[in-house]
Image: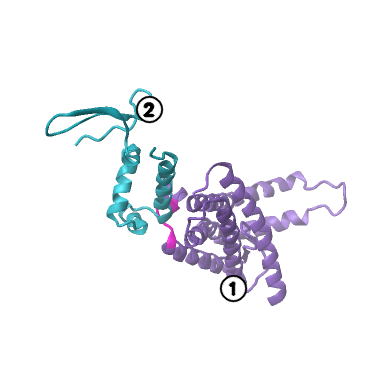
Chain colours: A cyan, B purple
Amino acid sequence: MKRIPAQCPACDSELAVTELTCLKCDTRVTGHYRLPPLSRLSPDDQRFVEAFVLSSGSLKAMAGQLGVSYPTVRNRLDDIIEQLSGNPDE
Amino acid sequence: MKAWLFKPFERVAGGLALAMGLIVIALTAVLAWRVGLHTDGVIDLHFGPAVGLWVLIAQGLINWLTLSLLLLGAGKWLSSGRFRMLDLFATQALARWPLLIGVAWLAIPNVGGEMESRTARLMAQMPDQPGQVIAPMEYMFDAMWLLLLSLPVLAAIVWMVWLMFHGYALVTNLRGMRVFFSFAGALVLAEIASKILIHLLMRVFA
C-alpha cells in the first residue's frame, strides 16, 4: 500500500487532503482536510509510534528490540511528543 | 566501533551500565592503589604517598557521586525532568572507564618509574630564589619526555570528560548552550566539592 505523503515534494510544506471518494458509489467530496497528526510524522517516526503501541507502550521492551538504550528511546519519544504538541490538530 | 567508543550510552544505560561502572571504579581504585596513584578530584590522576585501598575506593566513589548529584540537580532544573536518575548515575559511573586506561598506562613499570624520576629531577631544579632561571636547557629533555609520557593520560581524561558530557546530554535530552554550560558548571563545582570532601575524609579518618 502506498504511504500518504505528508510533505510537499516541491517546497516541503504540509500537504492537505482536498478530495475524498466513496469506494462504492464513486461520490466525490471536495474540501480542505488536514491529515491527522500521526500521518504528518515522518515514515520513520510513524514506524516508531507503531512499534511503541505494539509493545504496549513499554520503552524498556522497545529498547531491547531496537538494540539501543532506554534514554535513546525516551528521547525519540520526547521528540515525537514535541512534534505532535507543536502541530495541534485544528 | 566508533559509536561504542564515543557514544556508548546510545546502546547501554540503566542497571547494566551501573554495574559495569561500579566495577570500573573498583578496578581503577585497586590498580591506582597498587602503583601509588591518587584520584583526589573528579578529573585528577597523579602519583602521591602510599595510602590504604579504602582511600582510593572512597576517592572513586566521591568523584562519581559528586558529579552525578550536581548533574542530577542541573538536569532536573533545566529539562522537563522526565529522565531516570538510574540512567544518569549509571552513565556517569561507566564514563569513568578511560581513567582505568590512564591508570593502566601509568602502571606499566617503566612509564611510572620514568615519570616519577624525571619529575623528581625537574622539581629538584626548581629555583628557590626569585629571578632565578626556572630550568636550564639541559633539563628540557626531561620536560619533553615527561610531556610525551603524560599524553596518553591527558587523552584518557579528555575522553572521560567527553563521555560524561555525552551521558548527561543523552539522559537529560538537553541541547544547545544549556547542556554545554550546565555541564561545564557542574564539572567545575564537582571538582572543587570532591577535592574538599576527599580532603575532609583524609583529615577525619587518616
Q: Residue at x 46, y 64 (%)?
A: B18
The residue carrying pointer 1 sits among few (fewer than 14), some (14 to 19) or many (20 or more) residues within 10 Å by Cα, namely: some
| Amino acid found under the numbered disc labelled 2 | Asp
Q: Residue A47 location, x and y as percent?
A: 30, 44
Q: Secondary structure at mark 1?
A: helix
Name the residue tied to disc 2. A12
Q: Residue A87 location, x and y as percent?
A: 41, 38
Name the residue tied to disc 1. B53
Q: Residue at x 32, y 47 (%)?
A: A49
Tell me which corner region of the image, top left, top right, bottom left or bottom right, holds residue B190: bottom right
Q: Chain of mark 2?
A: A
Q: Is residue B31 visible?
A: yes
Q: Chain of mark 1?
A: B
Residue projecting furthest to the left: A24
The one nearer the camera, B153 or B54, is: B54
The one nearer the camera, B116 or B75, is: B75
Q: Is residue B206 visible?
A: no
The answer as to whether the residues below labels 1 and 2 share one chain is no
Q: Is residue B109 above or below residue B178?
A: below
In the image, which residues are magenta?
B8-14
Q: Residue B155 location, x and y as percent?
A: 56, 49
| Amino acid found under the numbered disc labelled 1 | Leu
Marking on residue B156: none
